[in-house]
Structures are given as C-alpha cells and as structure tokens.
Amino acid sequence: MLKRFTKYVSQNMLGMLGMSFYILADTFFISKAVGADGITALNLVLPLYNLIFAIGAMIGVGSAIRYVVAKNKNDKSADGYFFHAIAWAVIISSIFILAGAFIPDKIIALLGGDETIVATGKNYTRIFMMFAPFFMCNHICNAFVRNDGNPSIAMAATLFSSLFNVVFDYVLMFPLGLSMSGAALATALSPLVGVLICCSHFRSKKCSISFKPIGLSVKRLISSCQVGVSAFVGEISSGVITVAFNMIILGIAGNVGVAAYGVVANISLVAVALFNGIAQGSQPLVSESYGKGNTKDVKYVVGLAIKTALVLAVIIIAAIYIWSDPIASIFNSEKNMELAAYAREGIRLYFLGFLFAGVNIVGTSALSAVEAVRWAFAASIMRGFVAILIFAFALSAMFGMTGVWLAFPAAELVTMGLSIVGLKKSIK
C-alpha cells in the first residue's frame, strides 16, 4: 500500500503543481504586459474561475467516488456515472457561456472593479467564461482516469495542459500583442489538451470506464455532488475568500492592496495545489479500501496523507520565510514599494495557515471518500465560508491589513479541530 500511496500522491502533487503553475504564469505575464491594473483585474475575476472549477470538481470527484465504490461492490450502476457527469457539466456550463457573452463588464463591476479595471479585464472575462464546458469536462475526465487506476495519465494531462498554457500565454501576449485577451485564450484552450490526453486512457484496454448513455437524473446528480462537496467547497472557498478580501482591502488600501493580495493569493495556489495533490492522490486508495470494507487500510492511507501534509507544510513555511522578498518581487514589475511591503507581510502571515490547512484539505477529502457526507460538508463549510469570513471582518477591523492576513491561519486552526473529530468518528 505504501508503494501505491507514494505513486498516486507524488504524481497527483506533480500534476496539481503544474495546474497552479499556469495561474502563476498568467499573473507574471499580465504583470509584465499590463502592470498592477492587470493583476487587480485578474484577482477580481479569479472567483469566477473558482466557481467554474468548483462545479467541475464537485461533479467530477463526486461521480468518480460513486463510480469506484459501486465498481468495487460489483454494482452495475457504475457504468453510467461518467456519461451522466459530462452531460450535466455541459448543461450547467451554458449559464457561464451566456454570462460571458453578454455581461462580462457588469460582472467585473459587481466584483468591485472601477472603470479602468472593467476596461482592462472585460475581454479576458468574456473569453474564459465562454470556455467553461472545457474546464468542467477536464476536471471530470481527470477524476475518472485517476480513480480508474491510471494516475500517470491524469498527471500527464494536467502537466501538458499547463505547459501549453504557459507557452501560449507568452506567444499570444507578446509576439502577437494580444495582451489580456491572449492570456485568456491560452487559459481557455489549455483544458482541451488535458481532455485529449485523458482520451488515451479511455481508448486503452486498461480502461474500465463506460461512456454508457443514461437518462439524466437530478437525484443521481445530487447523490454524486454530496460526496464531491468537499472538492466543491475547496475550490469555491477560494473565490468567496477572494471576493470578501477584495472588498475589505479596497476599503483599507485601495487597488494597490488588492494587487498585493493578488500576489499572495496566486502564490498560495501553489501550496493549495500540493495539498490537493496529496488529497486527490490518496482519495482513490481510500475509496477503494472503503468499498472493499477494509477499514485497516483506510486508516493507514489517511494517516500517511496527514503526516505527508504536515511535513510539507513545515517545508513551505520555512521556504516562504527565507525567500519572501524575491518571491513577492516576481510579480512587481513596476517596483511599487507599497505593493512590495504589503505582499511581504502578507506572504509571511498568510502562509502560517497551511500548517492547519493541509490537515483540513486531506481530512475533508478522506471524509468524502468514505461517504461521511455530513462531516465533510461541515468541515468544508467551516473552513471555506463561516470561519474565514468571521475572522476576515473581525481581525481586519481590529488590525487593518495585518488582520486580513491573519484571518486565514485563524480560520484553518479552528476548522482543524472539527476535521479531526470527524475523522475519528467516521473511520473506526
């Protein structure tokens, strides 16, 4: 089991790291091409990405968990989960297509953008929202391939789609001079690469996934989404936090403060990606052992995942404290001293939260994998909405920007207690 755990987790961490890298590349290239206004626009619309990814992750991870548990119980209903997930993703994503086509400017304004930021980010928002079906389907394909015992293909799909995005970010933004629109096009087309690579597994003899057409069922969708809720909250919470923090920071430090938060948030995506890699890598093993009724292996895998998350958190925090200045300066092409000061403090304080966040990310994924829906939902909602919003408003009122940065560690610490209790009660 240790060998399989190492294989699944390492490959998923590498794949998720690649996914976060393209977001960093977006931020870096936009900072070079457009400056602080571009970073501000990107950060304001980041919650829309989070929402699209969250829905895709919820449907994909939830359906894949139901699929692998049903398969290990020799339940014939396993055959319809993949088709059902793809069909619903296409239907739901049509809402984003329409919004992107007709009201991208109003969406940015609603998220706090002034006239300058709306003009900067309008085309970017329109383009990536119209490609929502591909983002969602990429999540679903990746989750099913991973749960069908092929983490190598899932990793390759994520890495090569990210590499495509980085390369075409540069090509479209600079040699072709498309600026923010070029960045959006590169990002929008990258999931197509991931889906095409996943198709190599679907065509292979090792594939046990069936694309069997079945009638669409809201009940079946809800059943899948229930166990995918931690994946949903894990993604959407970033969007909710970003919206709340943007509104708070605009009142404290204006656009420069939002740009600084954009730097911190985008760098933190790398850390989140690594912890998600541990969670998603261990999830198929937990679900498989749970489906077979092997509680001993479930406990063993969950224990390994939590220990791995804690060691990783210590390494990340140490690295941040050593290299906080050069890391913050990467996205500050205009050498704005105010932005640099905010970002330096933000990185050091915000990243303390990953000592607890790693346990929560791995814990909620494990709870979903053993179908402990209520505990997974409670822990996810606590860290993704309740605790973080309470601490963000309370601490920012008392300590200004310092309080904003401390809200994340405080919320994750409170949630960790709930995650640990849920694991103890659900995995006996």
Image (cartoon, rainbow, N blue to C red):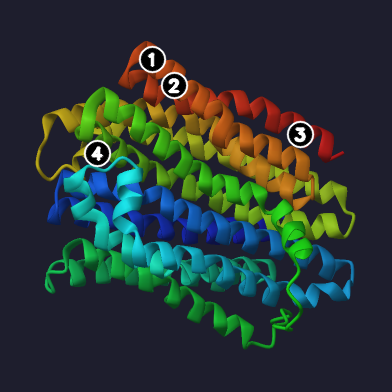
Secondary structure beneath label 1:
helix
- Residue 320 horizontal/vertical position (percent): 34, 34
Q: Which residue is mark 1?
A: 397
Which of disc 3 and disc 1 is earlier in sequence? Answer: 1
Kindly report which numbered mark, 2 or 3, lies closer to the viewer in this rendering. 2
Q: Which residue is mark 3?
A: 422
Which of disc 3 and disc 2 is earlier in sequence? Answer: 2
Categorize mark 4 by other alpha carbons within 10 Å: few (<14), some (14-19), many (20+): many
Q: How many marks?
A: 4
> Are the two marked residues, 2 and 4, in contact with CB atoms closer than 8 angstroms?
no
Residue that protrudes farthest toward the top in the picture: 398
Which of disc 3 and disc 4 is earlier in sequence? Answer: 4
> Are the two marked residues, 2 and 1, in contact with CB atoms closer than 8 angstroms?
yes
State how far apart marks 2 and 1 are (Cα).
6 Å
Which of disc 4 and disc 1 is earlier in sequence? Answer: 4
Categorize mark 3 by other alpha carbons within 10 Å: few (<14), some (14-19), many (20+): many
Q: Label 2 sits on what residue type? A: Phe
Secondary structure beneath label 2:
helix
Q: Label 4 sits on what residue type? A: Ala
State the residue at coordinates (37%, 50%).
Answer: 46
Secondary structure beneath label 4:
helix
Q: Label 3 sits on what residue type? A: Gly
Q: Which residue is mark 2?
A: 393
Q: Quadrant of residue 349?
A: top left
Position above or below: 352 against 70: above
